[in-house]
Image: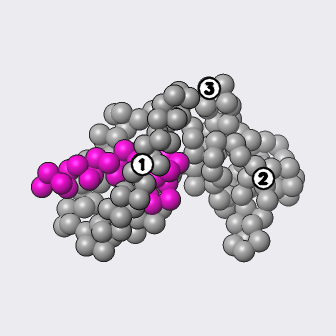
Amino acid sequence: MVNSLRSFQKNVSISKRSFRRFLTKLEKNPPRDLDKLTVSTEKEVWAEVDCLSCANCCKTMTPTYTPKDIKRIAIHLNMTSDEFKKKWLIKERNTGDWLNISTPCQFLNLKDNKCGIYEVRPVDCSGFPHLPKKKMTDYMHVHKQNLEYCPATFKLVEKMMMHLRDK
């Protein structure tokens, strides 16, 4: 997987600017069937991308933990919410968001890329990479960010560019 992750990172460095410009254009002037195209393209993406072979999101990003996430995970780990926060999280100064102290995520098993708290993982993780949202234009800023972290997001944008160019 290291080679394919390197390949992904190389592709990102080559295509990031043009992909972001494409997303900005879509955001400003979305085609009528953009949301339908996103849903059908997402299915193509998941036929090609396997998160367990990558886990780059868990290795390079941190989710934002909601108060419900903190409580749920702390209970799962037989801790209080305060113990959980003290051991694993840091409060971001400017936003007040609770984030992992470090990356990769402390719950990621680096041998098999599986999450140690998958059943109770943060909502931010369970929704990642946020591809099938009802209104694609509301998530363009998220996709622009995730392009460089997530092969599925990269592949979605790449495929959408091809589909829309063919129209």
Q: Nearer the viewer, mark 1 or mark 2?
A: 1
What separation in Å lies between label 1 and label 2 (alpha carbons)? Answer: 31 Å
Crowd tier of the residue under label 1, counting other residues whose Cα lies within 10 Å: few below 14, some 14–19, many 20 or above: few
Residue 155 among those drawn in magenta:
yes
Q: Is residue 46 above or below residue 123?
A: above
Magenta stretch: helix, strand or loop mostly: helix
Label annotation for residue 101: 2
Q: Are marks 1 and 2 in contact (CB under 8 Å)?
A: no
Which of 147 and 41 lies nearest the eye of the viewer? Answer: 147
Label annotation for residue 43: none
Give amino acid for label 1. Ile
Q: Secondary structure at mark 3?
A: loop
Label annotation for residue 112: 3
Q: Position of residue 68 (x, y in %)?
A: 68, 59
Q: Position of residue 8 (x, y in %)?
A: 46, 39
Image quadrant containing the C terminus: bottom left
Q: Residue furthest front?
A: 14
Which of 69 and 38 lies nearest the eye of the viewer? Answer: 38
